[in-house]
Amino acid sequence: MKDSEIKKAVRENYASVVTRGKSCCEPTSSCCGPATSCCGGSTASKAAAISKGIGYSDEELAAVPEGANLGLGCGNPTALASLKKGETVVDLGSGAGFDCFLAANKVGAKGKVIGVDMTPEMLDQARENARKGNYKNIEFRLGEIENLPVADNAADIIISNCVINLSPDKSRVFSEAFRVLKPGGRISVSDIVLLKELPDFIRESVSAYVGCIAGALKKEDYLGAVRKAGFKDIKVADECVFPIDYVANDPTVKAFIKKTGTTKKQLDDAAASVVSIKVQAVKP
């Protein structure tokens, strides 16, 4: 796929999460785990179940406006961020604002949170959530994470939750993150990486790409992009296998499996190569 086609597919999919109210039972609406992990109950309860499974506490889930948590992450970057009162936070791919609201609670009235997202429908939802929650220290901006609408040396910390993975130019994203951070600033991101290359039937699936898998880099290449951007003290704070079940449920993938006779072992091998990592690094 061309870069423009990838971005179009991602934008349309995440717009549909808001406009059609997709739940985590649908393969392309969540970046967090198997499609069957939370089916049943309301969309909000499904999103909450996903979020608890990837590291969010009950207190955090209760601390954000209703509708902010769409269950689209693969980790909890704010848990790693050690946010301080008065800091400026930039969230790459802020969606409906879930992590932004958590960050805003931590940095306080003297701090600031800037959420950046390329999907207008997500921004509308986030701004409405901010209004409902009476948040005064958050601003949501339309933009692409490869070209951040943020000034140089403006942020103390950059967070992101399973979004950099969706970019066709991840090196550019980390270069932009480096640009907008103050000296001594840091990144704390959750994302999906590969331990080995995926088979073609997954890499060529649009649903798998939007679901944060087909576009993933190998782990060493991902960390290499962070290093190349200029970051130091790079650390993988956590790592766990990312369930791939919902990719196997994608209609395109199902057809390919049937046509080629792909075995369960081949699927299991693919699943074992996909991991969620939480990365921290510092701008010197």
Image (cartoon, helix red, strand yellow):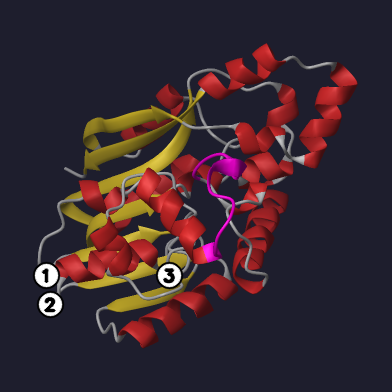
Ranked by sequence position, the earlier of labels 3 and 2 is: 3
Tell me how far mark 3 sits from mark 2, CA to CA. 22 Å
Residue 26 shown left or right of residue 189 in the figure? right
Is label 1 or label 3 in front?
3
Vertically, is 165 above or below 258? Answer: below
Q: Residues within 10 Å of mark 3 (few under 14, many from 20)?
A: many
Residue highlighted by disc 3: 68
Marks 3, 2: nearer the viewer: 3
Residue at the left extreme of this rendering: 85
- In the rendered image, residue 180, in percent from the top left (x then y), is placed at 30, 58
253 or 188, which lies in front? 253
Q: Residue at x 31, y 52 (%)?
A: 56
Q: Residues within 10 Å of mark 1 (few under 14, many from 20)?
A: some
The N terminus: image quadrant: top right
**What secondary structure is the magenta-colored segment mainly?**
loop
Nearer to me, 55 or 119: 55
Residue 107 seen in the figure: yes
Give the tally of numbered discs: 3
Q: Is residue 189 above or below residue 22?
A: above
Mark toward the start of the polypeptide (1 vs 2): 1
Which label sits on residue 50? Answer: none
Q: Percent x, y for residue 215?
A: 59, 37
> What's the magenta region?
32-43
Q: Earlier in the sequence, mark 1 or mark 3?
A: 3
**Above/below status of 124 relative to 153:** below
What residue is rendered at 27% in x and 47% in y?
187
Q: Distance between the Cα atoms at labels 1 and 3?
A: 23 Å
Badge 3 amino acid: Ala
Q: Which residue is mark 1?
A: 86
Can you tell which mark lies on residue 110? 2
